[in-house]
């Protein structure tokens, strides 16, 4: 594209980002509102954060969510990487088409259907629902995201690197762990992060898979949101938004620095 | 590692059969020599496509063997079968008399230098070179010394701590070479090893490669599509086409006595003249090539039946060009200069002969340009001796 | 096949078979069963202990009754139609909002683009639920939008947006906007800038160069973006249930209520099967578009 600054472009960017960020900004500002009425400003206060931290129901739901997200995203990273390897390097095997279909289908499947079908499975095999079933459900749909992220990296991976490892005496397993995995690690990590975020965020599938014994944070938020706006939820939202914002800014700064260093190295190498 | 020859780097000429005081290195002419690699009726098919077609060839210890051909001729497949990345469809490949088919790539005594170099980007130069050693039965404490030795051999001592993206293209090429040589393989496979370098660096590196091959005494098999590179580095060149080896010979014989139109045309510049041969006794033939023109007189080693359609192939530099009809040459033809390509050290004249045929003559520019005695559209005479060209059967 | 290869292929394969494919057959089976006041709340149940007779009884008990029921009750086909309508309208709005943003991003300078990219992706990492929730305070009767309208005199009475389909449109466009912007941006970004210059050199005005060159070349991105918004919007549950109120009919919400409130598992399953059938066409079209783009890239 040729780059031309124009008022039209500046306006669409300003309006577009205002649309994306003003609602969240309001949420953050009003989380510091003194009043219980969330739309009327009554002075600065952090009391809702205090109330939130004293709310055991929220804290235990947050704890459940974190546990589920950690377990399911780690499982999903392993399974998704394996699946990506099968998709890209697996060659031909029986049922390959079915396999790739099962990898891509969950990405476009409405959550209500995935949730319902998993719940019916758990019931028909008599599995007690709880944290374990949420982990199973989350691993299943997030591993597909991991495998898409990792396989897009593997496609551009120079196959001769693996061949060179074999040529130099590696067994195939050794070649994977000492050459392939270190090189695709950034993709696996971003796949893991994606899985972690999706799991943290999921309401529908967790609601189906959870049963009465476990409640995740999104389920808790949903049930209180249905009753209307509450300043405690605003405070909770602010905390979550800040964590994500800080995380994203740090990673983008780090990757910017890495790119700059790479470029400097390459320029230096070209001069030698 | 075998290092039987302590003398400093031999110049390329010395390796060639033309070398004077050294014994000629030509095990392929010695019926008692035991080959390192034997291809026996090897065929490789990818589905319906025949990549290697019933190929039989021997490669000897300490050889620098070049596989030369256009892309898709099967040269890379041949090399990948040696490395163990492709299986053989029919026939056997023997390494030191042992069938290598059941041996996986990580157990083979061969190493490969990849076209892309395939340097591990997450490891330093040092760790790249040590990679294979750590997976061999070499004692741990001997690995550093071996890595240092390889760094010295490839003049990379200063770069051990760098990552591959922190060094230049030429240095990467040398790291790839050092890594593949570190395990002292019986056979080193080089897949277009100089393809990624620019022309000047490539020429320097060719000599370096020969030097290292000489020092280490390793057998090299190189795949290339660059005929100049093959001619420079190799002790023998195999010219391949459609999965077959058309000619396997020393570079000078490939150039001087190609065995087919394909080889003559693929290697270097050549004038090909179609005609019909008539024997004149004593291995001499007259080739009628155009109505109303005197026949070309040439020699051939094998008997050719009268009237056989042949190609007469002659290199442009063996065709002399003069403004006056020369005396005492076996073949003289008259023509008109159509085009002159001035390349600095040499010039190529495109001369149109009677009947429209074009013949090229290449002349060294040992005189200043201004003193040239002929120019565009001038009448000139082309001449060459009886033994200057070869007669090729179609 | 060697054991290592068998393991690498087998483990994810079996996982997906057991937790993705098998559950679908269970949904299909229950959709063909009858509602019952029992645990589980449907019949027949496959009774393997009864042997062959049990399997035969099971087969005999299956029928299409639930699907017939869906066609008879206006609620269901109205819900399907209104889901289609809401998803389609939201997609068009998202395209109209998203295209200028993607276009402006693609024309931004090199040092700005990574930042703009980050700003587009950032909302995606924040909680979906919270982003939907943030609109309640804006759209409600005493919300910020109405406060602003009344204060500025643009309107004399508060607008009732909350709990209407308008609120659902806003919610969908807001949450799925990055999915529209990113593929369009990707298509525009890799476009060769000299094409526009060539078009202008050949006599196009800037606007006609846009219509004749830029827009057609960004078509694959537009198509991908539209599917990425339309497909999830069709089965959406969270947005209509938070912003849409009780009068907004969407099929995801109907399924949820059928299951959790009415505890009618067979009907919920039948709703799911029909929703899936509705989705198959756009999904296949989407895959074809992606496939064509991959081939064009090679």
Image (spheres, rainbow, N blue to C red):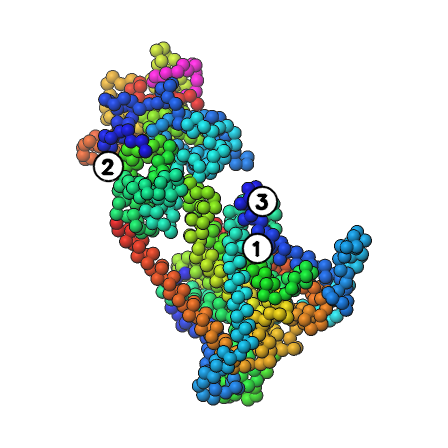
Instruction: Tell me the residue that label 2 is attached to.
Output: B344
Q: Which residues fall within the magenta stretch?
A: B298-310
Residue A45 magenta-highlighted: no
Which residue is at the front of the view, C129 or A7?
C129
Mark in the foreground, 2 or 1: 1
Secondary structure of the residue carrying tag 2 is: loop
Q: Tag 3, which chain? A: A
Q: Are marks 2 and 3 on the same chain?
A: no
Q: Quadrant of residue A186?
A: bottom left
Determine which residue is flagged by label 3.
Answer: A93
Percent position of residue C100, x then y: 47, 68
Density class for disc 2 (Cα within 10 Å; few <14, some 14-19, many ≥20) is few
Left or right: C283, with B178 as reference point? right
Q: CA distance from mark 3 to mark 1?
A: 16 Å
Is B393 or C223 nearer to us in this picture? C223
Q: Which residue does the numbered mark 1 point to in the structure image? A: A103
Tag 1, which secondary structure? helix
The CA distance from mark 2 to mark 1 is 62 Å
Alpha-carbon distance for marks 2 and 3? 60 Å
């Amino acid at each position: 594209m040729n780059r031309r600054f124009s008022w039209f472009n500046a306006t669409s960017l300003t309006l577009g980002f205002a649309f994306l960020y003003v609602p969240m900004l309001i949420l953050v500002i009003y989380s510091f509102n003194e009043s219980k009425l969330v739309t009327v400003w009554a002075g600065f206060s952090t009391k809702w954060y205090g109330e939130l931290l004293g709310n055991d129901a929220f804290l235990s739901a947050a704890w459940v969510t974190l546990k589920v997200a950690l377990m399911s995203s780690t499982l999903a990273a392993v399974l998704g990487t394996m699946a990506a390897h099968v998709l890209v390097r697996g060659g031909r095997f029986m049922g390959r088409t079915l396999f790739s279909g099962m990898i891509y289908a969950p990405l476009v499947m409405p959550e209500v259907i995935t949730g319902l079908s998993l719940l019916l499975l758990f019931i028909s095999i008599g599995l007690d629902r709880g944290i374990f079933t949420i982990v199973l459900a989350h691993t299943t749909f997030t591993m597909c995201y991991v495998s898409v992220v990792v396989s897009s990296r593997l496609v551009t991976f120079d196959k001769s690197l693996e061949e060179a490892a074999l040529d130099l005496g590696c067994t195939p397993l050794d070649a994977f762990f000492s050459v392939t995995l270190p090189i695709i690690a950034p993709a696996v990590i971003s796949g893991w992060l994606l899985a972690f975020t999706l799991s943290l965020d999921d309401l529908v599938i967790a609601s189906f898979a959870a049963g009465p014994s476990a409640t995740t944070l999104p389920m808790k938020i949903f049930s209180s949101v249905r009753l209307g706006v509450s300043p405690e939820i605003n405070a909770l939202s602010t905390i979550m938004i800040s964590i994500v914002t800080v995380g994203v800014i740090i990673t983008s700064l780090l990757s910017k620095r890495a790119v700059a260093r790479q470029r400097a190295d390459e320029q230096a190498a070209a001069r030698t | 590692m075998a290092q039987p020859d302590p003398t400093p780097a031999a110049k390329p000429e010395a390796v060639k059969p033309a070398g004077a005081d050294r014994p000629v290195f030509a095990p392929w002419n010695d019926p008692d020599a035991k080959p390192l690699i034997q291809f026996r009726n090897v065929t490789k098919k990818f589905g319906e496509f025949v990549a290697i077609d019933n190929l039989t060839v021997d490669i000897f210890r300490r050889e620098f063997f070049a596989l030369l051909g256009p892309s898709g001729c099967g040269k890379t497949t041949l090399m990948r079968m040696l490395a163990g990345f492709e299986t053989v469809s029919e026939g056997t490949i023997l390494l030191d008399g042992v069938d290598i088919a059941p041996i996986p790539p990580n157990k083979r005594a061969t190493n490969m230098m990849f076209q892309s170099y395939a340097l591990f980007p997450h490891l330093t130069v040092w760790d790249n070179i040590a990679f294979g050693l750590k997976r061999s039965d070499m004692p741990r404490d001997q690995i550093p010394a071996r890595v240092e030795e390889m760094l010295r051999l490839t003049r990379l001592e200063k770069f051990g701590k760098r990552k591959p993206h922190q060094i230049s293209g030429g240095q990467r090429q040398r790291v790839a070479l050092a890594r593949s040589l570190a395990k002292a393989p019986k056979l080193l496979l080089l897949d277009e090893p100089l393809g990624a370098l620019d022309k000047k660096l490539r020429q320097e590196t060719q000599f370096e490669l020969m030097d290292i091959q000489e020092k280490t005494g390793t057998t090299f098999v190189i795949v290339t599509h660059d005929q100049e590179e093959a001619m420079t580095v190799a002790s023998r060149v195999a010219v391949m086409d459609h999965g077959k080896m058309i000619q396997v010979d020393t570079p000078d014989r490939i150039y001087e006595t190609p065995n087919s139109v394909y080889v003559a045309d693929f290697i270097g510049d050549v004038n090909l003249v179609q005609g019909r041969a008539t024997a004149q006794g004593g291995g001499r033939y007259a080739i009628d090539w155009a109505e109303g023109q005197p026949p070309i007189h040439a020699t051939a080693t094998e008997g050719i039946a009268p009237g056989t359609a042949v190609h007469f192939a002659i290199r442009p530099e063996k065709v002399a060009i003069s403004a006056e009809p020369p005396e005492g040459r076996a073949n003289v033809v008259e023509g008109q200069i159509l085009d002159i390509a001035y390349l600095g050290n040499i010039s190529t004249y495109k001369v149109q002969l009677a009947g429209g045929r074009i013949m090229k003559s290449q002349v060294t520019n040992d005189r200043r340009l201004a003193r040239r005695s002929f120019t565009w559209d001038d009448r000139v005479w082309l001449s060459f001796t009886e033994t200057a060209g070869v007669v090729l059967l179609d | 096949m060697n054991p290592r290869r068998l393991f690498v292929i087998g483990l994810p394969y079996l996982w997906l078979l057991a937790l993705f494919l098998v559950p679908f057959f269970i949904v299909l089976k229950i959709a063909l069963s009858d509602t019952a006041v029992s645990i589980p709340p449907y019949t027949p149940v496959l009774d393997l202990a009864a042997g062959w007779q049990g399997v035969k009884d099971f087969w005999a008990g299956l029928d299409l009754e639930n699907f017939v029921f869906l066609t008879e009750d206006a609620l269901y086909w109205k819900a399907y139609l209104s889901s289609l309508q809401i998803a389609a309208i939201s997609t068009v709005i998202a395209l109209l909002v998203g295209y200028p943003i993607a276009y402006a991003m693609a024309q931004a300078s090199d040092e700005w683009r990574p930042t703009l990219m980050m700003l587009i992706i950032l909302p995606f990492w924040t909680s979906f639920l919270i982003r939907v929730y943030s609109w309640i305070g804006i759209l409600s009767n005493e919300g910020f939008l109405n406060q602003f309208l009344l204060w500025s005199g643009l309107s004399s009475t508060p607008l009732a947006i909350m709990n209407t389909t308008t609120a659902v449109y806003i919610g969908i466009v807001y949450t799925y906007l990055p999915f529209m912007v990113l593929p369009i941006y990707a298509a525009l970004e890799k476009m060769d800038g000299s094409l526009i210059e060539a078009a202008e050199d050949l006599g196009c005005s800037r606007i006609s160069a846009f219509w004749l060159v830029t827009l057609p070349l960004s078509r694959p991105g537009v198509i991908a973006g539209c599917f990425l918004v339309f497909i999830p919007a069709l089965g959406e549950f969270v947005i209509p249930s938070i912003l849409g109120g009780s009068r907004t009919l969407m099929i995801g919400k109907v399924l949820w209520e059928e299951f959790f409130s009415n505890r009618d598992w067979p009907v919920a399953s039948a709703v799911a099967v029909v929703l899936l059938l509705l989705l198959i066409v756009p999904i296949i079209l989407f895959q074809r578009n992606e496939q064509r783009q991959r081939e064009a890239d090679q």
